[in-house]
Image (spheres, coloured by chain):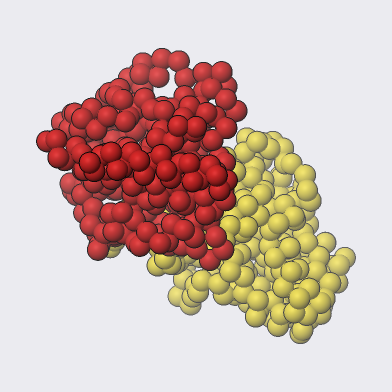
Amino acid sequence: MAEMKKIATRESFGLALCELAKEHDDIVVLDADLAAATKTEIFKKAFPDRFFDCGIAEANMIGVAAGLAAAGKVPFAASFAMFATGRAYEQVRNSVGYPHLNVKIAGSHAGITVGEDGATHQCCEDLALMRTIPGMVVLNPADHYEMVEAVKAAYAYQGPVYIRLGRLAIESFNDPETYHFELGKGITLEEGTDVTVIATGLVVNEALKAVRALKEKGISARLINIHTIKPLDKEIVLKAARETGKIITVEEHNIIGGLGEAVAAVTAEGCPVPVYRIGIEDTFGHSGPALGLLAEYGLDAEGLAKRIEALV
Amino acid sequence: MDKSELLELKKTACQVRLWTIEGVFNAKSGHPGGSLSAADMMTYLYFREMNTDPSQPKAPGRDRFVLSKGHCCPALYAALALKGFFPTEEIKSLRHIGAMLQGHPDMKNTPGVDMSSGSLGQGISAACGMALAGKLSGEAYRVYAMLGDGECEEGQVWEALMFAAHMKLDNLCLMVDYNGLQIDGNVADVAGLDHLEEKFAAFGMEVLTINGHDFEEMEAAFAKARTVKGKPTVIIARTVKGKGVSYMEDQVGWHGKAPNADEYRKAMDELSAQLKALEA
């Protein structure tokens, strides 16, 4: 696997969008004065005629995207996760979700790794909000290669999709030679029999390091990467529940409404086993460097290893 | 338009009102007041102004209409049915379980409905998106959207207006059904829309004010809107809420209430008499 420098999934998103747009002239991109941050500026430079800055008006942006989709375009509308899914929640529900329009919503700067901007911008509720909208596909890619494929899959899917993007530059752990993305299918990164760790998004790589460290201590933890929060891969979850008898979920999101509760719902109905949710424990974040915050909230490799070891 | 065309429009508008009352009465709920104030403009749109074909409701080149004040869909359904998008019989099951016609417009299931709407302030943004798509694709279609006066209290409306002006969407024609009433009372008392013309003009619109029950004024305004280049047009239509049914006219209580059997009969009798007078 070729060495690759750290890259934030927002940048991977911008690059992927640009590549995809070369082949598909129905793609248009909207932003709300955050093109430099969401990295839609990469698209803007390449396709200025297909990029529209809606200004600081997210509600209108989502509505405009709905109208573009109703008239046959495939709009990708980007803003910070807080505003795209929070400020404009009702527009996403009623103007996009209810008519099941082909709008792709990208929420950048999700989770606490926004860092210094603090709690007002650290959206840990976006997955919960988007999961509740009927017909909405919810994607949370974990690294560069996964994001590139997720963007292609979002375009190929006919209907509304939410894609979560991160601000923090991260290592890529997937191997582009072998990586395969299938919408709604989880990926087993490590086999294991004592417990299954199910992680999503930016913290998957941290969970991977933690699980590998625990292997050296004789703890056999399975690791599953869930890039599609909805529809959730029930099969892989139930298989893990049956075979390891215990599940630990890891997400950079409120433990209410996110991956953990989605997994717990599947096991509760299909194979009741203990499910422990690691994430943001129903609290707001605060300012600080992203990596420092990850450590503080126990979401870095070291913190995860400790928590998982204690729970096994 | 000549006299016979004007007469035909008046008769059609009367039919739209009859079917509006029919729908709301059978639904035992709904919004007759604003439907009746908007009935003449919807009639004009579908029977005079817009390029639509009921046999091809999804034709890419068609003109589009977004009822941003979605609760007034009884009048839209009546206009669409009379135009031939679906049988008028459907109107009798408005709001019923399993019905095609929902309490607010549903583009997925109702032929001729170009956008789902009902949550106020949202339709205008979708209309902007459609107009932008038309510009991008080089299509000549026009996009129409109707707002309520009370709806203009929603912040999203003004976000959308800024966008529409900035993007120079001259293929977009907005209408405000200015009947002066909203659920809690007079618009002027609830939140106030003073200087609405000036507000729209300041936001970059071409602003035209007409009597929303006068087809000749509509003809002049819509014709003018087609000639405006580089900016959208908004037509402020002064209307009477409940127009056409004497006891509903200008009465806030008829915003969202269905007539009982006696009231239904009276409304149908009044509207039938109006139609008969036009046919004579």
Q: In this view, which residue lies farthest toward the bottom? A: A243
Write the residue at 41% across / 39% down. B270
Side of A169 relative to B57 (left or right): right
Q: In this view, which residue lies farthest toward the right? A: A310
Q: In this view, which residue lies farthest toward the front? A: B280
Between residue B263 and residue B160, name the one nearer to us: B263
Res B11 quadrant in image: top left
Q: Which chain is yellow?
A: A
Where does the C terminus of chain A fall, quadrant-wise?
Answer: bottom right
| Tally of numbered discs | 0
Residue A86 x %, y %: 60, 43
Residue B80 x %, y %: 33, 53
Write the residue at 62% across / 70% down. A232
Q: In this view, which residue lies farthest toward the left? A: B2
Between residue A297 and residue B120, name the one nearer to us: B120
Between residue B237 and residue B142, name the one nearer to us: B237
Residue B74 visible here: no
Side of A260 relative to A87 (left or right): right
Residue B253 visible here: yes
Residue B83 x %, y %: 28, 54
Side of A17 relative to A291 (left or right): left
Side of A136 relative to A189 (left or right): left
Between residue B154 and residue A89, name the one nearer to us: B154
Q: Which chain is red?
A: B
Write the residue at 34% across / 33% down. B175
Residue B97 x %, y %: 56, 63
Write the residue at 42% across / 61% down. B90
